Image (spheres, rainbow, N blue to C red):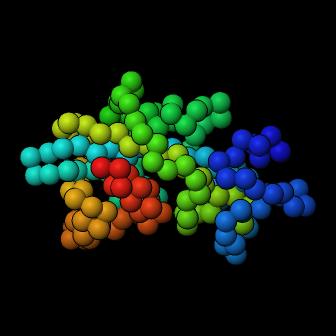
Amino acid sequence: MRRQGEAIVPFDVYGGRPVNPVQRTGRVGRDLGRWGENPAADPIVVADSPAGRVVLLIRRGDCGLWAIPGGMVDPGETAPQALVRELREETGVDLSGLPSEVVWSGYVYDPRNSDEAWICSTAALYRLPAEVTAVAGSDALDARWWPFPSVDGVDVAVRAAGDGLYTAHVPLLRAAASRL
């Protein structure tokens, strides 16, 4: 399996099927696009605002929860290319050419994972001096800046609005917050 050698997290193949290297989910098959590791790119955009630090999140179309914009790395595409593409597709924000810092490269505990297909993400932090206009696109229902004094702070703000935060992205947000 060629992709096995390119994986962010090494994994085994048993009986011709990839084996989730981190957890047993009790689910089989590939509800994700590919067998084995499904590489994702998650751009975490943080800006300064008059009210304090903010983070750009999207409301996911599949579950309605607020999440980091992002998605799967396309075949032949690099993670840095996917970071820029996904952000532009889901928020209309183009940060191509802007430096970023990789804050996460690894397994993500996503509810779509199975014993044979799972997500590993490259998450990168983009820092802006001010908010930029964001408009929902692609599979996002909404795009919005949220207060980001801390991960717990953004979670409180999202819950106060009657919504929820996509739990698979909480560790990625924590990794970004630790670099601020």
Task: Give left or right: position of 61 versus 151.
Answer: right
| Residue 10 appears anywhere in the view | yes
Residue 131 picture quarter: top left
Up/down of 2 relative to 64, above or below: above
Pick the front one: 180 or 140: 180
Check the image and name the residue furthest to the top.
97
Q: Quadrant of the N terminus?
A: top right
Q: From the top left corner, tell me how far across and down residue 57 is, in percent.
A: 32, 51
Up/down of 119 relative to 80, above or below: below
Pick the front one: 118 or 7: 7
Check the image and name the residue furthest to the bottom.
26
Q: From the top left corner, tell me how far across and down residue 14 is, in percent.
A: 87, 61
Check the image and name the residue furthest to the right.
15
Determine the residue positioned at 28% across, 45% down. Answer: 46
Residue 155 picture quarter: bottom left
Task: Give left or right: position of 42 versus 56.
Answer: right
Pick the front one: 121 or 101: 101
Determine the residue positioned at 71% across, 62% down. Answer: 21
Task: Give left or right: position of 58 versus 112.
Answer: left
Q: From the top left corner, tell me how far across and down residue 113 is, in percent.
A: 62, 63
Pick the front one: 141 or 94: 94
Q: How many discs mark residues in the rendered view?
A: 0
Determine the residue positioned at 60% across, 31% down. Answer: 77
Check the image and name the residue furthest to the front.
179
Determine the residue positioned at 10% across, 52% down. Answer: 51
| Residue 140 appears anywhere in the view | no
Q: From the top left corner, tell me how far across and down residue 147 is, in percent.
A: 20, 56
